[in-house]
Image (tube, grey):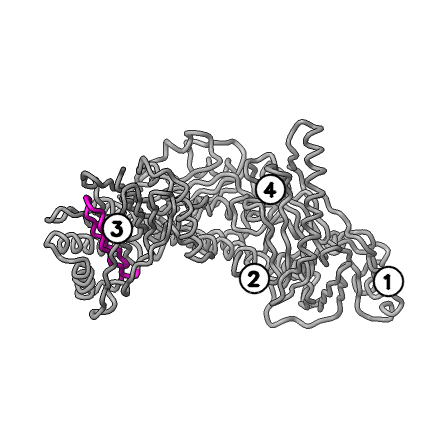
Amino acid sequence: MEAVGGYAGGLYLRSGAQGLLRVAVLSGVPPQLFRPWWRMHVNRPYPVAEAYRAGQAVHLPDAESAMRRFPQLVAGMPFPFGSMYEPVSAGPKRFGVLFALRAATPGVPVGALDRERLREAADRLARELAEIEEEAGAPVLWDGDPLPVAPPGGHGGPREAVDRLAQAVLSLDRQGTIRFANAGAGELLDSGGSELLGRVLWEALPWLGHPAYEDHFRAVFLSTEPVLFSARRGWHSPGDWLSVGLYPGPEGVTLTIGAGEKPAYAPAPRPAPASAAALGGGPDPSGDRASPLYRPVALAIALTEAITARQVSAVVTEELLPAFGGRQLAIYLLDERHLHLAWETGFPSGFLDRFDGVGLDVRLPGVETLTSGRPLFFESMQHLAAAYPGIPLDADVGARAFLPLIASGRPVGSCILGFDVPRGFSAEERTVLTALAGLIAQALERARRYDSESALARGLQSALLPHRLPVREHVETVGRYLPGTEGMDVGGDWYDVIETADGRLALVIGDVQGHGVAAAATMGQLRSAVRAFALTGSTPQEVMAGTNQLLIDLDPGQFASCCYVLLDPESGRTRAVRAGHPQPLLRHPDGRTEVLELAGGVVLGVDPEAAYPLTDLRLATGSVLALYTDGLVEKPGTDIDAGVERLRRSLAAARPTPLTETADRLIGDVDDDADRPDDRALLLASRPR
């Protein structure tokens, strides 16, 4: 922390749960204020998870850079601070992530020296962990709470001047422990200064632990900016308002408390939840308490990125359950007046199957919460059994919340949250859960529309693409199409091989701008137009010009790129035109592979006067011609030329025969990304020896 100019930091390590990291060591921040982030799944959109997944450091100099890359981090920590995250790994072994919090440096990136220092620290730590793992013969895992470690340096001692002040002045170390209290603190807080020393602030002064104040303390421990707010000691007694000031520094926080006036807006008293002990259980399990605002904001941001119903359900599992300490989740969707189980986690295997497909006339809490539009909260399983006699229960101890999923007045389904122990639901929690149910319903409704349109578009696109290519002597053709991964829109990519009346072959590849049903429909119209022009004996220029005019006349609000190559199988003579499409590749018989420089015109559907110049080539025996769409070479954040070069090298390294193996290699091995944001189409033509 000192080496990189930080004031807080810690270490995430792998846990015994698959894909879950846990904070093992924490310094400079009181553990209770960092509780919402004690656990981090490696698939969540947070810098810690990305550093672990990618095995690369993440450096965020300020909140603006964090907002661009990790909006959910800023939603939970909306404070001005910088941060660094370094993976702790030794060769292929990944142990966790080392991180440091530091003052924000807007517009100034993290320096090379600080990056190297953190990298060296992570490397030393990785070597030591590897030795521990080797000696123990078992993986290094962490399943406990974080170990608080006092940061280096002093704790900030008393100064004679502060004892002359009427207001209370306390000095906290970066673990939240009171290290100094002036004489004014003893008088104002009705407690001797010596009684406060060595105690955690919120234990010594529990009234400062109100949820409304948590973000103020987070702000100063996670950032370097001072914070001023109004507070009061007794929620049920009149007056007694105090002015509280928090002033952070590298070694701790100075807390000042003085007489104040009631603010224009005052947070409401903390609702008293039903006692878990009174219900026969233990303490409230919802230990991961972030600020009330964090829950809906973080979930809302995550839901905007979820496209399919499964993605929405996964987001609810990752964001909603940890926030409230839940262990079980089930989502039912309404279809033709019946509720069907769409997602479940945490329930005994097969238990919920008996409720799958129930009608809206059945008396069950999951049904009645939807038909009435009211959420149902049961603080114990005994309360649930009493309200619905004879209902099958998956456990004898616990609590349940049934939430209606209603979007814009339309019923979508119902959501069930389960808890392992009895617990109360405060008014605040009931309000937040009801609001979140509305967000979930909106996301599910959007996802169902997307799923329907996506299925239609994929079916349309599959029907329009050629199911087989012509088999001709002297020439071999192979086509491949790889759709974008689940959750991505269907594109308008297409390819075709057309036998013309004079015995030549027309090789065609194109890409309609846009996605979804409209793009797929336009693709079908263009493919039919190109085929019709080619079969009438039109020249390549006439084919392209006629297709361009047709797209303009149709006016679908879209444009398309296209490459059209007319090949004589016997002689290898080739005539080609191009409309804004990526340049083809040509692998010569000796293995030399080049990017062709075909003259081209603008994309189709823009300029009715556009001209498409002709380029003459010759496809020699043993050579391979590759036509492709931009999904095969374009990658977010990188230059398309780099993608073309990767594809060129892959074609050069591939064996020219069999051509099917070459096509499979090019379509699937261009990069290692699991997610494809766009479709990929490829058409190869070869004149075998």
Is residue 132 toward the left or the right of residue 96 in the image?
Answer: right
How far is mark 3 from mark 4, CA to CA?
58 Å
Residue 129 position within the rendered picture, expressed as x and y whole percent measured from the top left: 69, 37
Pointer 4: what residue? 21
Residue 286 position within the rendered picture, expressed as x and y whole percent measured from the top left: 59, 45
Is residue 273 toward the left or the right of residue 172 in the image?
Answer: left
Q: Secondary structure at mark 3?
A: strand
Pointer 3: what residue? 618
Which label belongs to residue 65?
2
Q: Secondary structure at mark 1?
A: loop
Pointer 1: what residue? 158
Specify the amino acid type for callout 2.
Ser
Specify the amino acid type for callout 4.
Leu
Dot 4 alpha-carbon crowd within 10 angstroms: few under 14, some 14 to 19, many 20 or more = many
How far is mark 4 from mark 2, CA to CA?
24 Å
Frontmost of labels 4 and 2 is 2
Frontmost of labels 4 and 1 is 4
Specify the amino acid type for callout 3.
Arg
Tell me where the magenta segment starts and ends, as one range: 559-580
How far is mark 1 from mark 3, CA to CA?
88 Å
Among numbered discs 1 and 2, the one appearing first in the sequence: 2
Specify the amino acid type for callout 1.
Pro
Dot 1 alpha-carbon crowd within 10 angstroms: few under 14, some 14 to 19, many 20 or more = some
